[in-house]
Amino acid sequence: MGLLDRMRAALGGGAKRKGTGLELSRWASAPPRREVPALLAAYAEMPWLGTIVDTVGDAFADVTWRAFVRQDPTTRKALVDVSLRRACGDVRRERLKSLVDGAGAVELPDHPLLRLLADPNDYMTGRDFAKLFCLHYDLVGEFFAVVEEVAGVPVGLWPVPPDCVLALPDLSKPKSERTYTVTAGGRMFSLPAASVVYVKRLNPADPLGRGIGIAYALGDEVDTDEHAARFTKNAFFNNMLPGAVIAIEGFNEGQAGPARAFKESLAREYGGPANAGRVMITSGRTTFARLDTPFRDMQLVELRRFLMDFVRMVYRVPPEIVGDVTSSNKATSYAAREHLAEQATKPRAEVFLAAMQKHLAPRFNDDVLLSYDSPVPADREHRLRVMGTLPSAFTFDEWRTEAGFKPHPERHGFAELLPGQKPNEPGQTPTPAEGSSAEANAEAEKGT
């Protein structure tokens, strides 16, 4: 038996992988990081972080999923195509399209896996489930979903907050004995590893341990922005540090009455936003010392703008997507949608697809191949330039469709003969129907 045969026997036969002995005990008891609850709470408490994560999550939830099965074109027998299963993005879509055209694959629009993704449980829609995956993945770097099965077939997906998963499976144990430790409602559960779909953003320092989200690395930036907002609020509401100290000559600790009366007059005449900036004129010798720093000197506006842009760039979201049109035009606005799809939506779709293909697809026993429509919007400007370069290469229906109109019932085919095309060949404008307005126009043209 050759090396290739031995590898095939090991991978495709009954032999099970047993590990290498590197499954350290610290991986068995990996608890959630103490920052996880704070990161989940930051979504509701920090508007800019929530906006960016929401934007990416909404774009990911718009992805349309499809299911295919590979088959022999002649016998229609199902085939296993590992290379197609491993292919990514545009390569997978192009290969599937070619196979479907050649009867080498068939699309399954009503496959149970698609139903499961569209209706994961009784309390969430498929869109909610997809967006929640993105929120957990971006904030914490982990997503957990418990698979509900009936007769061995998945019928439900129930998401679990990452901070509720207290321990990952012990990788030193046999696969059938590995469990997740989960807490919910004040109770602790042990769930079989086979019943949990676990997707994570790998931590290079601990690849078999807990995941790590993008928001974890942005902790200092989002905290600084939040503290700047609260500092500004406190400056108008109640600041522990007084803005100025006034010392009046002749006042001492034994004269509490005049000092209190002076303070009350200040609060009465100069307190509140409406009296900000009023000038006080008083008699006697006074000493004034300013303690606060003006907002202009602190450059809080510039600081917050920088932090917002930094968070946005880390998530690869163009400024136009979140309403920043300071230096935008029509071209950059259209390009922003493509950039968001290429840099943010597609990578997350590939992560989600790989997890569903690995953990859920094998449970349906039909070698289903999951795919999705490209989220990148069509470049209409490029398409119009191509169509305008050689208009005769496109039919009336194609031009009307591009303009957003329905095909015309009396005008089909090409507007004029293509180079080398002869009359009566397919594609020529057909003879007008008898009694139609097109026939009347043709007769009028002949008369002239």
Image: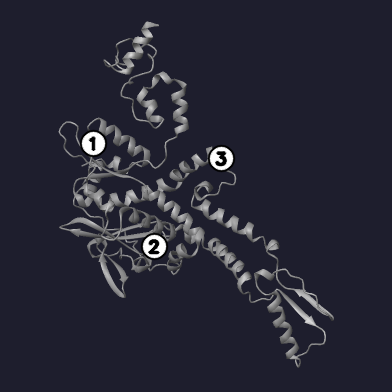
Q: Which residue is mark 3?
A: 329
Assess whether mark 2 and mark 1 are in contact (beta carbons under 8 angstroms): no
Amino acid identity at mark 3: Asn
Give the residue at x 26% y 69%.
190
Q: How many marks?
A: 3
| Quadrant where the C terminus is found in the figure | top left
Label 2: how many Cα within 10 Å (few below 14, some 14–19, many 20+):
many
Amino acid identity at mark 2: Arg
Give the number of the disc on residue 210. 2
Mark 1 and mark 2: span between their CA atoms?
A: 38 Å
Using the image as rendered, state which of residue 22 and residue 217 is in the foreground: 217
Label 3: how many Cα within 10 Å (few below 14, some 14–19, many 20+):
few
- Frontmost of labels 3 and 1 is 3
Disc nearer the start of the sequence (1/2): 1
Give the residue at x 32% y 71%.
183
Disc nearer the start of the sequence (2/3): 2
x, y (%) of residue 129?
33, 56
* Secondary structure at numbered mark 3: loop
Q: Quadrant of residue 120?
A: bottom left
In this rendering, the answer to whether 337 lies above or below 50 is above
Amino acid identity at mark 1: Ala
x, y (%) of residue 131?
37, 55
x, y (%) of residue 315?
48, 52
In this rendering, the answer to whether 367 lies above or below 75 is below
Q: Quadrant of residue 436?
A: top left
x, y (%) of residue 96?
29, 36
Q: Is residue 155 found left or right of 143 in the rendered image? A: left
| Quadrant where the N terminus is found in the figure | top left
Q: What's the coloring here?
A: one colour
Q: Which residue is mark 1?
A: 105
